[in-house]
Image (cartoon, helix red, strand yellow):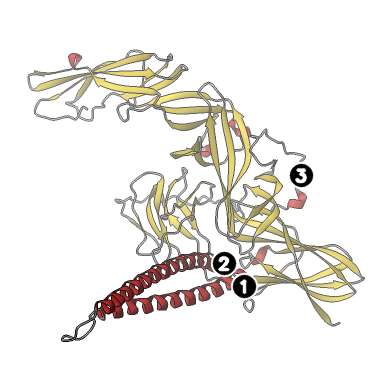
Amino acid sequence: MAQTKKNLESKIDKVTVFLEAAQVQRSGKVALMPGKYELVFTNSSPSIDKQSIQVKADGNLTVLSVIHQQNFLKEQQKQDEMKVVEEQKENQLEKIVLQKNILNVFKQEEALLIKNQQIGGANSGLKAIDLKDAADFQRSRLTEVYQKQMETDKIIKRLEAELAKMNKQLIELNQKSDISTSEIFVTVNVKEATTSNFVITYLVKQAGWFPTYDIRVKDISSPIHLQYKANVFQNSGEDWKDVKMFLSTGNPNEDGTKPTVDPWYLKYIYSTQPILLKSSNEILSIFNKNVLSGKITDENGKPLAGATVVAKGTTTGAVTDANGNFRLQMPAGSKTAVVNYVGYQSRDINAPGGGFANVTLNASTQYLSEVVVVGYGSSNKYDGDNLSNDNSFKKKKEETAINTTITYQPTTTIYEIEDPYTILNDGKTYMVDINGYEVDALYEYYAAPKLEDDAFLTAKIVDWQELNLLPANLFFEGTFLGKSILDVANAGDTLKLSLGKDKGVVIKRTLLKDFSSKKFLGSNKTDTRKYEILVRNNKQQPISIIIEDQFPISTQKEIEVSDRKYDGAKLDDDTQKITWLFSVDPKKENKVNFKYEVKYPKEKILQLD
């Protein structure tokens, strides 16, 4: 039986975005007569995961095979708009050259007029009327020449400004001009005339999302407004326009195999040296625990703004600024971060404990070869058609949030964005409001004035597990809280949020000199120290505050710490940390004191401040 080839247009109508990667669903409709057909679905993403393609079709037909291949002969042609701009640029350059030539002619005429100001010979006289006529001509013509030069110069500047805009537009368009396409070939056998609806799903890796939380607090007597937002990005080679979107907390790139405990062999640990990454110019120096920072550049050293850096296996991420710099608070247990940017190969950063990394990304040149994949079979990935609301519930959202339905699966949570959404193939991060919560919280202040004269506002949330939160960076009133992170992995029954410093609470730690002294007795000397800690509440509401300080701990037999006084505080015998918990009324202040003595040999020096 002869095989008929038929090109079909399909439309993206549904996308499920995972933490890493996305599942795209295309649909198309075609009328077929009995026979064997090779249906070609064109203009698909060039970065399809070849093992993930599935094809479903209704009607009286059989899918015989599914083939995916890169379209090397049909590299995407430059957009019509780009051709128009290039033609405009050529015309603009010709206009600029013409005006510069005109300006040069006027300059030459100016030089000629100035050079020929000497009138008549050395021995010949010149009548007054002739001199006047010559001077009038010189003045008139020079004035006209200067006027023409000024007008021409203005024209050149205007043309060059327009040319600069064209160059910027061409740079923007060139970023998309080299995107290739791919094709999916579906061979079917039609038994009787039918109109069939085809649904094709596949996975693309250059996509993902990570959450952030925007926290709004009216005052410390009001509930917390917690706005849950998704930051979605994609560079799959195709635009997602007005699609039905789902956000899944699943990650198809994670290994689902249960781990095996291998024998544990003890080895000596040597001093930490800078960690050398894959390239010799990428050195990671450990200097700040669990904080990873650095700069992302291309092969030419140009900073890449908008690159994403995500802690591997989590949803905690950061985006580089205009200079390519980033700063990421690594969650506990995370040792690797993944760097992604549009059109570049992703990179892993080995960063146990944090550090600093200069990372160079290489342009992506990977192509998919022709492969054959199965057209039928079950899939363990989420299928939007099978979305069930039986076990789902809706949380009350902020009025600004997009309508979202939350569905809980055995191992993942899926957020259905009820309104159509558009995510373009530009590598930019699009923010989508998922949900909003109003949560009761216990507000408490914390201060360690020995280290820092500031009070930090914290909030404690109970029964937080019902909110189904993910680890993410926090924003307070729209402002990024540098090191504040929603660490749900290490939270117990109570989730603690750090909301930053509050200048409305004043903390001051003072050494009381009248009660502090240094005495010498025999071969020893005794230092007596007494401190006063003042807490002033300048706010309109009463506050609850935790104050922490400490007694020194002796490490030598001849050093003795005694006469500890800490009225109203609790003492940890192991760490010698002292803790006060008390309330302060509005516009009032409280004071607490603690005291200790240290005896040690008089020829020795101790740091007691």
> According to the image, label 3 marks what residue?
388
Residue under the point 73% across and 62% down: 11
Amino acid under disc 1: Gln
Circle 1/circle 2 CB separation < 8 Å: yes
Q: Is residue 311 above or below residue 529?
A: below
Residue 251: x and y, percent?
60, 52
Circle 2/circle 3 CB separation < 8 Å: no
- The number of numbered discs placed on residues in the rendered structure image is 3
What label does residue 176 carry, if any?
2
Q: Is residue 199 above or below residue 108?
A: above
Place residue 276 in its image quadrant. Answer: bottom left
Viewer-side residue, 131 vs 538: 131
Amino acid under disc 2: Lys
Q: Residues within 10 Å of mark 3 (few under 14, many from 20)?
A: few
Residue 172: x and y, percent?
53, 64
Q: Is residue 84 visible?
A: yes
> According to the image, label 1 marks what residue?
76
Q: Is residue 594 left or right of residue 55?
A: left
For mark 2, give the secondary structure. Answer: helix
Looking at the rendered image, the disc whose residue lies closer to the viewer, 2 or 3, is: 2
Place residue 200 in its image quadrant. Answer: bottom right
Place residue 288 in its image quadrant. Answer: top left
For mark 3, give the secondary structure. Answer: loop
Residue 387: x and y, percent?
75, 47
Q: Is residue 578 left or right of residue 167?
A: left
Amino acid under disc 3: Ser
Viewer-side residue, 276 vs 235: 235
Q: Is residue 459 above or below residue 196?
A: above
